[in-house]
Image (tube, rainbow, N blue to C red):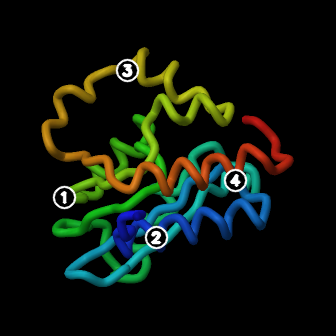
């Protein structure tokens, strides 16, 4: 019997699917949650916006900040379909996100053509994050990654 998905991770997966359907980029969707309410959402828009910084986490952070009219997301959590790259991890830290929940790992990204592993090796330091990041609902996110892998898409 399948375990029920966390509802925020389910929303992040749905956001990722919207991005894939639009041809915006990879299977990366994110939601920012404060006090049990989704205040920001985003998906990878690297191809759609011709912007290498338009990752799902960054887009969700931008959306949340606009909605609450603040650059400070203290007390918020982010749920994202893939373990954040170093750019997104730093964006979460700069935004004062209190916790990151992710589905697929950095290593999983390589199976769908992404090179996050290279940057992870280059910058390292995840071992210093303690319990700031927690994996959850990996199987559901792996299914999303497989859906993406099966569809025609540009690698970048």
Tell me the quarter of the picture where residue 99 sits. Answer: bottom left
Q: Are marks 4 and 2 in contact (CB under 8 Å)?
A: no
Point out the tag, 4 or 2, that comes first from the N-terminus. 2
Dots 2 and 3: beta carbons under 8 Å? no
Label 4 or label 3, whichever lies nearer to me, is: 4
Q: CA distance from mark 2 to mark 1?
A: 20 Å
The residue that disc 4 covers is 147
Could you tell which of marks 3 and 1 lies nearer the N-terminus?
Answer: 1
Mark-to-mark CA distance, 4 and 2: 15 Å
Element type at mark 3:
helix
Few, some or many residues within 10 Å of mark 2 (<14, 14–19, 20+): many
Q: Residue beneath label 1, please?
A: 98
Q: Which residue of the protein is positioned furthest toward the right in this rendering?
A: 152
Count of number-bearing discs: 4
Q: Determine the residue positioned at 66% across, 57% down.
A: 45
Q: Earlier in the sequence, mark 2 or mark 3?
A: 2
- Quarter occupied by residue 110: top right
Residue occupying image coordinates x 42% and y 49%? 138
Task: Tell me which label, 4 or 1, sits earlier in the chain.
Answer: 1
Residue indicated by mark 3: 123
- Could you tell me which secondary element the residue under label 1 belongs to? loop
**Residue that sits furthest to the top in the current view:** 122
Q: Position of residue 27 (x, y in %)?
A: 62, 53
Does label 2 or label 1 sit earlier along the sequence? 2
Label 4 – label 3 distance at C-alpha? 30 Å
Q: Position of residue 69 (x, y in %)?
A: 35, 80
Residue at the spot of label 2 = 10
């Amino acid at each position: 019997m399948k375990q029920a998905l966390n509802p925020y991770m389910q929303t992040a997966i749905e956001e990722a699917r919207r991005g894939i359907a639009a041809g915006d980029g990879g299977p990366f969707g994110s939601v920012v949650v404060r006090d049990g309410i989704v205040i920001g959402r985003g998906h990878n828009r690297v191809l759609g916006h011709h912007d290498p910084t338009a990752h799902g986490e960054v887009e969700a952070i931008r959306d949340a900040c606009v909605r609450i009219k603040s650059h400070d997301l203290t007390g918020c959590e982010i749920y994202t379909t893939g373990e954040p790259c170093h750019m997104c991890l730093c964006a979460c830290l700069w935004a004062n996100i209190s916790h990151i929940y992710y589905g697929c790992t950095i290593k999983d990204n390589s199976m769908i053509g992404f090179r996050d592993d290279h940057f992870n090796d280059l910058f390292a330091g995840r071992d210093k994050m303690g319990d700031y990041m927690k994996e959850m609902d990996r199987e559901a996110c792996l299914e999303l990654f497989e859906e993406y892998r099966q569809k025609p898409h540009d690698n970048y």
